[in-house]
Image (cartoon, rainbow, N blue to C red):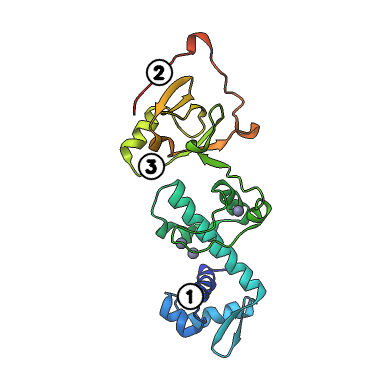
């Protein structure tokens, strides 16, 4: 596949099919913004991605697989932008899908916990990562609120629509890469980060996403400072 317009074409075919609309040139023109669709059609046919049945445009198995991957990348990208980056997922996702590779999509899918639906509620076609973990669906990244007291992990990202909250979290040195240990959940969250004990409101704790503690993610240079370097502070936030 050489150009983006070819990809947009088969992506649009997939979307039409999801709406129970049989893809035809007329429907492609009606629902998309693809210029010279007949020309694209000819290219896709000669590349073996589609076949024609009268006015109906059908996927070949290769075209079907390609469209599946594109839709999957697109919707995983939407989830990433929406869940992690907190941004406008409408504009960025389509560009993302055309530059990504399957391995990267699998990694993001795993990080997000193999989501089934995009933020619009459309199904995300599953990948190999999803089926291999289907019996033990364990998120790699979990909200702090899902951790058990005594567990530790590494901060993956912090997400909040509330700027003030973000600044509070930042001020507490809770940043990606920081080692975090959960001490208690009730009556309020108490965590240890950078050798300080910090009390957090529940809604703030829920916005902190943590890599499950595995040896792989623990930075080797992290040393627990005892004695002089140790201080304790409690903050209300
Ligand atoms: Zn797209
Ligand atoms: Zn979507
Ligand atoms: Zn997956």
Answer with mark 1 or mark 2, whichever residue precedes in sequence: 1
Residue at the top extreme of this rendering: 228
Asked if residue 3 shows in the view, the reply is: yes
The reply to whether dot 1 and dot 3 touch (C-beta < 8 Å) is no
Q: Quadrant of the N terminus?
A: bottom right
Tell which of 103 and 37 is nearer to you: 103
Disc 2, SS: loop
- Badge 3, how many Cα within 10 Å: few under 14, some, many 20+? some
Q: Is mark 2 within 8 Å of ligand 3?
A: no
Q: Which mark is residue 19?
A: 1
Q: Which mark is residue 160?
A: 3
Answer with mark 2 or mark 3, whichever residue precedes in sequence: 3
> Vertical placement of 229 versus 134: above or below?
above
Q: Residue at x 36, y 36 (%)?
A: 166
User: Which residue does the numbered mark 2 point to in the structure image?
Assistant: 233
The residues bearing labels 1 and 3 have C-alpha atoms spaced at a distance of 34 Å
Asked if residue 1 shows in the view, the reply is: no
Q: Residue at x 54, y 32 (%)?
A: 148
In the rendered image, residue 155, in percent from the top left (x then y), is placed at 50, 34
Disc 3, SS: loop
The residues bearing labels 2 and 3 have C-alpha atoms spaced at a distance of 24 Å
Q: Quadrant of the C terminus?
A: top left
- Badge 2, how many Cα within 10 Å: few under 14, some, many 20+? few
- Badge 1, how many Cα within 10 Å: few under 14, some, many 20+? few
Residue at the bottom extreme of this rendering: 54
Disc 1, SS: loop
Q: Which mark is residue 134?
A: none
């Amino acid at each position: 596949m050489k150009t983006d317009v070819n990809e947009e074409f088969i992506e649009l075919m997939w979307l039409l099919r999801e709406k129970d609309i049989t893809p035809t040139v007329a429907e492609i023109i009606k629902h998309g913004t693809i210029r010279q669709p007949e020309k694209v059609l000819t290219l896709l046919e000669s590349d073996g991605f589609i076949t024609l049945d009268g006015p109906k445009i059908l996927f070949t198995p290769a075209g079907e697989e390609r469209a599946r991957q594109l839709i999957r990348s697109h919707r995983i990208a939407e989830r990433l932008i929406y869940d992690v980056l907190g941004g406008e997922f409408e504009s960025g996702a389509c560009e993302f899908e055309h530059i990504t590779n399957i391995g990267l999509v699998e990694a993001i899918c795993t990080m997000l916990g193999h989501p089934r639906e995009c933020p619009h509620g459309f199904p995300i076609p599953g990948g190999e990562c999803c089926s291999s973990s289907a019996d033990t669906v364990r998120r790699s990244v979990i909200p702090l609120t899902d951790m058990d007291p005594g567990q530790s992990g590494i901060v993956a990202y912090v997400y909040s629509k509330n700027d003030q909250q973000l600044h509070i979290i930042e001020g507490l040195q809770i940043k990606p890469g920081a080692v975090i240990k959960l001490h208690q959940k009730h009556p309020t969250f108490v965590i240890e980060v950078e050798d300080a004990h910090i009390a957090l409101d529940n809604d703030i704790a829920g916005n902190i996403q943590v890599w499950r503690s595995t040896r792989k993610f623990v930075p080797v240079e992290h040393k627990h400072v005892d004695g002089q370097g140790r201080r304790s502070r409690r903050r209300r936030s």
